[in-house]
Amino acid sequence: MTDTRNIDVDGFILQQPPFRFVSRLDAFDPGEAVVSFTPGSGNLLMENGCLSAAGLMEHMAQANAARLGYLCVYVLKTPVNIGFIGQIRDFTLHRLPREGETITTRVSLRYEVLNVSLCEVEVRSGEELLASATIKTAIKE
């Protein structure tokens, strides 16, 4: 995997604060990406000192978008394509991340056909699994 921690996500994430739920793309290869995020009081979708379940799902979707955005800009040398979530399946929540807690998310590509991809996403705090889901995304050309 390529270490991408020093690359500014502004170049390939379309969402902007306070609705950005990705702090950094830590590592990338075409079939997998690792993203980190630290929820704070300035983020939307915070509830009672934690990122809400909706916020966590949005983070997972943006982690997937970070993988695709980096692929477009740095590998394919094309503009970032807009993606649409087609489905979030098997969302399992073990615990919500707390304000100030850094979470690490692994996005693993399972298949890609035409402009549709299916990824498995796992969110962790350290070694603790916080949430997982399968996300289907369609890319607009």
Image (cartoon, rainbow, N blue to C red):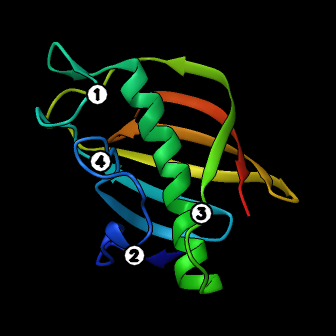
Given residues 104 and 12, the one toward you in this image is 12
Q: Residue at x 42, y 22 (%)?
A: 54
Q: Residue at x 48, y 50 (%)?
A: 63
Q: Please report whichever mark, 4 or 2, sits nearer to the chain's N-terminal start.
A: 2
Q: Please report whichever mark, 2 or 3, sits nearer to the chain's N-terminal start.
A: 2
Mark 1 closeness class: few <14, some 14–19, many ≥20 residues within 10 Å: many
Q: Relative to 31, is 45 on the left or the right?
A: left
Spatial CA distance of label 3 from label 4 is 17 Å
Residue 37 numbered tag:
4
Label 2 sits on residue: 4
**Dots 4, 1 in contact, CB < 8 A:** no
**Dots 4, 2 in contact, CB < 8 A:** no
Q: Position of residue 6 (x, y in %)?
A: 29, 78
Q: Quadrant of the C terminus?
A: bottom right
Is 141 situated above or below 6?
above
Is 21 situated above or below 76?
above
Q: Residue at x 28, y 27 (%)?
A: 97
Which amino acid lies under the numbered mark 3 shown in the image of this protein? Leu
Residue 68 numbered tag:
3
Q: Please report whichever mark, 4 or 1, sits nearer to the chain's N-terminal start.
A: 4
Q: Please report whichever mark, 1 or 3, sits nearer to the chain's N-terminal start.
A: 3
Which amino acid lies under the numbered mark 2 shown in the image of this protein? Thr
Spatial CA distance of label 4 from label 1 is 10 Å
Label 1 sits on residue: 97
**Dots 3, 4 in contact, CB < 8 A:** no
The residue most toward the top is: 48
